[in-house]
Image: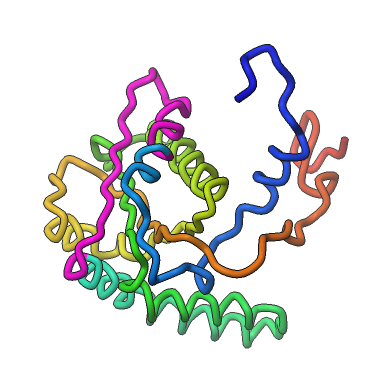
Amino acid sequence: MPSMGEPFDLDQTDTLLTTTRAVRKRLDFSRAVPHELLLECVRIAAQAPSGGNVQMTRWVFVEDPAKKAALAELYRRAYEPYIAEQKRAIAASGREDMDKIVSSSDYLAEHLHEVPVHLVPCALGRPEGAIHGSVAGFYGSILPAVWSFMLAARSRGMGTAWTTLHLAFEQEAAEVLGIPPTVTQVALIPVGFYTGEGFRSGTRRAAEEIAYLDGWKQPF
């Protein structure tokens, strides 16, 4: 590992950052994820910055089949009306490049309970009633850590995907997992080793189109 003053191998870091994809269809359902590997990723993720260094992130990993099934059912309850609306919007827009994404999303919804590990990252406290800046700070103190976990998992041969649909039934999920009402669930992330070949960078808009200088829509 490079020391603080040593340069990084940019080919390696840029590859990690540009090829960490949402993994849905390529999760290995048959291979358990070692606990030490999960904790290794948490140790790395815990180094992420947080407001005031409050370290408010907590990591709830779920392997119990009955609890995974319960979470997956909550996810599907929210997914069905969500994806139906998405499909109507896609049809109305005339887009023809969304079939792969929709198929991948459908697959995860159908098989979520089979994924080896569910990760429910949580934040201590609740943001209800907070002003916009406080809400941004609240989530800004946990999201970098979760993304660090996902990058660490990717570099160790695991796939992840950020999902939030189960949060429509957050209280029911809290009852399944014994999470106190003073704690905020942030996502439900399937975790497992990935199968198949490696990943490629995705198609994105040019940086010059989405980066502004000194004002809204002011080009570099």
Q: Residue at x 83, y 51 (%)?
A: 206
Question: Can residue 25 be seen in this snapshot?
Answer: yes
Question: Which colour style is shown?
Answer: rainbow
Is 57 part of what is drawn in magenta? yes
- Between residue 166 and residue 37, name the one nearer to us: 37
Q: Residue at x 79, y 43 (%)?
A: 217
Residue 83 locus on image (x, y percent): 46, 79
Whether residue 3 is situated above or below residue 22 in the rendered picture: above
- Between residue 134 and residue 53, name the one nearer to us: 53
Whether residue 107 is situated above or below residue 134 in the rendered picture: below
Is 141 part of what is drawn in magenta? no
Task: Place residue 103 in its image quadrant.
Answer: bottom right
Task: Place residue 196 in its image quadrant.
Answer: bottom right
Quadrant in which the N terminus is drawn: top right
- Between residue 204 and residue 63, name the one nearer to us: 63
Whether residue 160 is situated above or below residue 97 in the rendered picture: above
Name the side, left or right, on which 14 lies relative to 30.
right
Residue 50 locus on image (x, y percent): 42, 26
Residue 177 locus on image (x, y percent): 16, 55
Range of the magenta residues?
A: 41-67
Task: Place residue 77 in its image quadrant.
Answer: bottom left
Whether residue 117 is situated above or below residue 5 in the rendered picture: below
Name the side, left or right, on which 83 lies relative to 3.
left
